[in-house]
Amino acid sequence: MANKTLDYENYTILIIDDDSTNLYVLISSLETSGFKVIVANNGELGVKKAQIEQPNLILLDVMMPGIDGFETCRRLKADEKTKEIPVIFMTLLDSNPNKIKGFDVGGVDYVTKPIYHKEVLARITTHLELRDLTVKLNSKVEELTQTRYLMMQQIEELTETRHQLVQSEKMASLGRLVAGFAHEINTPIGVAVGAASTLHENVGTIDQLLEQEEVDEEELVGKLNNIKEAANLTLSNLKRASLLVNRFKNTAINQSEESLRQFQVKSAIFDVINSLHRHFENTVISIQVDCSKELSIHSLCGALEQILTHLMINSLVHGFEAGKKSGSINIVVRLNGDNLHFEYSDTGKGIASEHIENIFEPFFTTDRTHGASGLGLYMCYNIVTTQLRGTITCESSPGKGVLFKIDYPNNIKRYQ
Ligand SMILES: Nc1ncnc2c1ncn2[C@@H]1O[C@H](COP(=O)(O)OP(=O)(O)OP(=O)(O)O)[C@@H](O)[C@H]1O
Ligand SMILES: [Mg+2]
């Protein structure tokens, strides 16, 4: 006896057979087991009943007048409404060609006549279970496909939101950049405009003096001195404005036309140290470099030199108070797989915690009174992130110096 794992009452079996003796035996044995049974005594009627009644399984006789079992099965399998219903063939002929043909036209199994009740029940149970599992599986697949679709939609939405955030952050930082630049340039230009109007006034007064018959020499000299002062003020402020414009221009992304090449990192570092010799010669600042002579990368040499120059000048100016304090600068370089890891530290005065977040912002400086414009680290940040496709971070606390960590790929393909 087949294990009764199914509730047979919930299943309908369609028997298509013209052999009334067989039909009688089957109907009574299946109904006794609890199945709902429907019957058709030829193939055409069987196909119609299958379409209307949607049975869970079909027992199909092979030899019938009119269309035979194989053709009936073909028609069932060709119809959307019936193609999923499992078909078990019943054949008198226990011949291999018939069995194979049955599978070829879409049958899932066969039983031989005369029907043995236990066998047919076992096969029916197996195929109903299989069918139920397939339906469950299909609905799971459907569910998963739906979930996947929803997830894809969410990912798309997130990507779009992220894109919008990046865009608005870009606009905001552009706004800050323009505002900072306008603020910076406003002072020297304002002073220059004031001085130029003093010039203008004094030239007018001199004109008037010269029209008089007797010129008061003292007054004339006084006015000329005013003119000299105003001219100096105009010139120095216009120079400051022009310097700011130039430095600002240099911060523009990808200002460098430099091409990628293979170079030795250690020798690039020493080129920078030598070029800054003049600035460090009268100080008590030692410089240590820990970098293998063999370490050579395919990258932008000038970009690395620019970064190091800004960092070293910052150490000198801010960390060691324009070279008045003593201390050391340490540079450590390693190749981590495909990444160049560059550590720059000094033992200077460090950066206050309330400033650390701002140091890469354009125009942030704690040294405006000495003419600093706050563009050095902003330039470093731009070079590292846009030209070198890397990252730069800074750790510092007052009295403990600074530690900059820079990582970027040593691989031409990564730039494309
Ligand atoms: N090594 C350092 N030690 C202490 N403070 C530093 C150091 N490097 C940078 N800073 C701080 O970070 C600020 C920003 O540095 P950044 O190089 O961007 O501008 P700046 O040096 O002030 O001006 P610029 O570089 O345009 O002349 C500095 O004003 C200073 O407060
Ligand atoms: Mg600087």
Image (cartoon, rainbow, N blue to C red):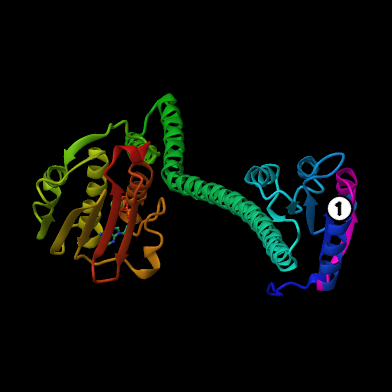
Query: Which residue is drawn at the image coordinates 75% and 56% (left, top)?
Result: 113
Query: Which residue is drawn at the image coordinates 68% and 54% (left, top)?
Result: 109
Give coordinates of residue 274: x percent, y percent: 11, 44
Taking the image as shown, residue 299 lies to the left or right of residue 289, namely right
Give coordinates of residue 88: x percent, y percent: 73, 54
Q: Which residue is mark 1?
A: 19
Q: Nearer the viewer, residue 25 or 193?
A: 25
Query: Which residue is drawn at the image coordinates 35% and 41% (left, top)?
Result: 414
Label 1 sits on a secondary structure element that is loop
The image shows residue 173, relative to residue 394, as above or below, that is above
Instruction: Based on the picture, tell me whether residue 143 belongs to the magenta stretch.
Output: no
Is residue 288 among the parts visible in the rendering? yes
On the image, which quarter does residue 323 sit in?
Answer: bottom left
Total marks placed: 1
Q: Nearer the viewer, residue 12 or 256?
A: 12
Q: Nearer the viewer, residue 412 or 204?
A: 412
The image shows residue 79, relative to residue 401, as above or below, that is above
Q: Quadrant of the N terminus?
A: bottom right
Type of amino acid under label 1:
Asp
Q: Quadrant of the C terminus?
A: top left
Magenta residues (range): 33-50
Taking the image as shown, residue 24 lies to the left or right of residue 322, namely right
Taking the image as shown, residue 191 lies to the left or right of residue 403, namely right
